[in-house]
Image (tube, rainbow, N blue to C red):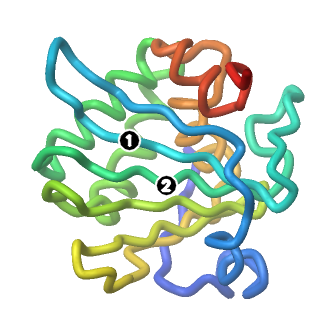
Amino acid sequence: MQTVLVSASANSAGLSKEVMGQWQQWPIVGQATLSWLWLDIYSSQLRSPNGVYQQVGDISPHPVALEIRYMRDISNKQLIEATEEQWQKQGYSQGEIDVWIPTLNTIFPSVKTGEKLVYVTDGSAGEFTYIAQNGEQQVVGTISDESLNDAFLAIWLSPKTEYQHLREQLLGMNRP
């Protein structure tokens, strides 16, 4: 069985302060909005230090930041269920999912309209930051397991994602 470590300290995951502190200045690679019928669920932005996402076999071969701004209230339970559903659709084993879900359950907050959840990774480990409507930021958890790091980002960035059009927009493939 795989062990996943969760921490509220960026240093314990090996993330440099430079990576964690600079993501807001990184250029936007792409952006997308997930809608269901006529309801907007969230808008997202992908950022990287040079404004480019390198598409290779590894989902996160370099630092990236995925920022999600919620356009409706979503509970922790709904976030967890949606994450698990996406992993199942991408073919992750139930054993892997069963290890990862408890970790994310301790990290994911319930979110309200206008709030953000940002995941910043150095390519192998990452940190979740919750940003309230008033702009106040709080680190809510850190992932030090590279397989969970990649699986989380795969929901949006993998060629196996359910939402290919969103992936293309996030990766900047639809630029004029």
Name the side, left or right, on which 112 lies relative to 69. left
Frontmost of labels 1 and 2 is 1
Q: Which residue is mark 1?
A: 43
| Local SS, label 1 | strand
Residue at x 61%, y 63% (from the top left corner): 120
Q: Which residue is mark 2?
A: 67
Instruction: Please name the amino acid that badge 1 sits on.
Output: Ser
Name the side, left or right, on which 157 lies relative to 110. right
Residue at x 34%, y 52% (from the top left corner): 69
* Residue 35 pos. (x, y %): 27, 23
* Residue 43 pos. (x, y %): 38, 41
Instruction: Please name the amino acid that badge 2 sits on.
Output: Glu
Against 97, residue 111 (above or below) is below
Mark 1–mark 2 distance (CA, rounded to whole Å): 8 Å
| Local SS, label 2 | strand
* Residue 153 pos. (x, y %): 59, 40
Q: Residue furthest front?
A: 176
Q: Residues within 10 Å of mark 2 (few under 14, many from 20)?
A: many
Between 68 and 86, the one nearer to me in the picture: 68
Residue at x 53%, y 21% (from the top left corner): 92
Against 43, residue 167 (above or below) is above
Which corner quadrant of the image does residue 24 belong to? bottom right
Q: Quadrant of the N terminus?
A: top right
Name the side, left or right, on which 56 lies relative to 144. right
Between 81 and 64, the one nearer to me in the picture: 64
Between 64 and 5, the one nearer to me in the picture: 64
Which corner quadrant of the image does residue 55 belong to? top right
Q: Quadrant of the C terminus?
A: top right
* Residue 98 pos. (x, y %): 38, 37
Which corner quadrant of the image does residue 54 belong to? top right
Q: Residues within 10 Å of mark 1 (few under 14, many from 20)?
A: some
Between 149 and 48, the one nearer to me in the picture: 48
